[in-house]
Image (spheres, rainbow, N blue to C red):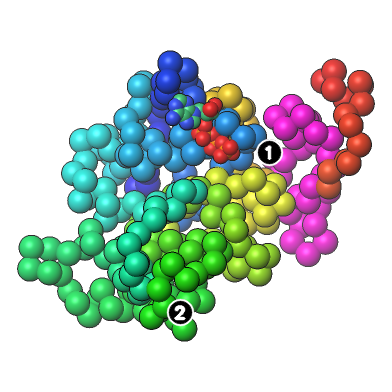
Amino acid sequence: MTLRTREVAWNRGGRLVVDGVTLHPRPGETVGLLGPNGSGKSSLLRLLSGAVRPTRGVVVLDDKALADTSRREAARAIATVTQHADTVVDITVRHVVALGRIPHRGTFGGDRRADAEAVAGALERTGLADKAAESWHRLSGGERQRVHIARALAQEPRELLLDEPTNHLDIRYQLELLRLITELPVTTVVALHDLNLAAMFCDSLLVLKDGRAVAAGTPDEVLTPELIARVYEVDARVGPDDETGRPRVTFSRGARTAATSAG
Ligand SMILES: Nc1ncnc2c1ncn2[C@@H]1O[C@H](COP(=O)(O)OP(=O)(O)OP(=O)(O)O)[C@@H](O)[C@H]1O
């Protein structure tokens, strides 16, 4: 059972910013969402999270339309980390992470020990254990990003939606974060700009352009110089990485030639 879409479209401000996209991840896999600025990645993630309703098509969670699923049920299953991390009042890192436990609270307050363990585990995994008592406002951009990821982990979701989670992170934390999410037993859809990180960590890729899916498959199948030229309008070479065997993309720094631009 996974969160998936069937031919979803979303009309935003009079324009279809997502146009007939079907996404059906295998349980536990990490799907990379690629595409240029404005291609619809964040919009598709918003549809998947239930934050907005599709104009056409359907988002399905466990064989039921997400629109017919209770907010609480959806919040227990799906965790989201968005690009524009919400600002919160002056509370500690631990408190922000503990917000992830809210969907698990029952009428009688839920299981306190499970809450504490989930929060401690999430802080540990994101390298924030020693910052737990610090004020949110004193954190750097990258640390805040990690706190939001910790909050999503504390939620113990089955489905994880991440919108450019490596933004603001230094290279060590970019690698750690992506390793972490690929090792989690959850299905993850992650919007990424870095094609090499996507190739290194994702099981499959979905490429959007102008709201439409233009390629889908394994990194090997998807990341070809032709596709990169068509979607991003840049010239690139692609070869197997020495260490992983996965595709590695090297960009040409020059302007595109007439011959390549014509394709
Ligand atoms: N509030 C809005 N009203 C109308 N259109 C919007 C709104 N916000 C974004 N859009 C448009 O929706 C389209 C898709 O945007 P979206 O943010 O989903 O793309 P993206 O692939 O995530 O881009 P980026 O890589 O720049 O984050 C864009 O053309 C954008 O201009």
Quarter of image, res 243? bottom right
* Mark 1 Cβ inside 8 Å of ligand 1: no
- On whether residue 238 falls in the magenta region, the answer is yes
Provide the residue designation for mark 1. 222
- On whether residue 223 falls in the magenta region, the answer is yes
**221, 213: nearer the viewer:** 213
Quarter of image, res 258? top right
Answer with mark 2 or mark 1, whichever residue precedes in sequence: 2
**24, 79: nearer the viewer:** 79
Task: Tell me which residue sits at (92%, 21%) in the image.
Answer: 259
Q: Nearer the viewer, mark 2 or mark 1?
A: 2
In the rendering, at what x and y percent does residue 162 appear? 48, 51
Q: Quadrant of the C terminus?
A: top right
For residue 27, say whether it is visible. Answer: no
For residue 246, say whether it is visible. Answer: yes
Q: Which amino acid type is shown beneath numbered disc 1?
A: Val
* Magenta-drawn segment: 220-249
Task: Tell me which residue sits at (84%, 35%) in the image.
Answer: 235
Provide the residue designation for mark 2. 131
Left or right placement of residue 92 versus residue 33 in this view: left
Asked whether the residues under the numbered discs 2 and 1 touch, taking CB atoms below 8 Å apart as contact, a structural biologist would say: no
In the rendering, at what x and y percent does residue 153 appear? 39, 65
Q: Secondary structure at mark 2?
A: helix
Q: Which amino acid type is shown beneath numbered disc 2?
A: Lys
**133, 129: nearer the viewer:** 133
Task: Tell me which residue sits at (80%, 33%) in the image.
Answer: 234
Q: Is residue 168 above or below residue 254?
A: below
Q: Is residue 161 above or below residue 182?
A: above
Left or right placement of residue 190 versus residue 228 in this view: left
Quarter of image, res 112? bottom left
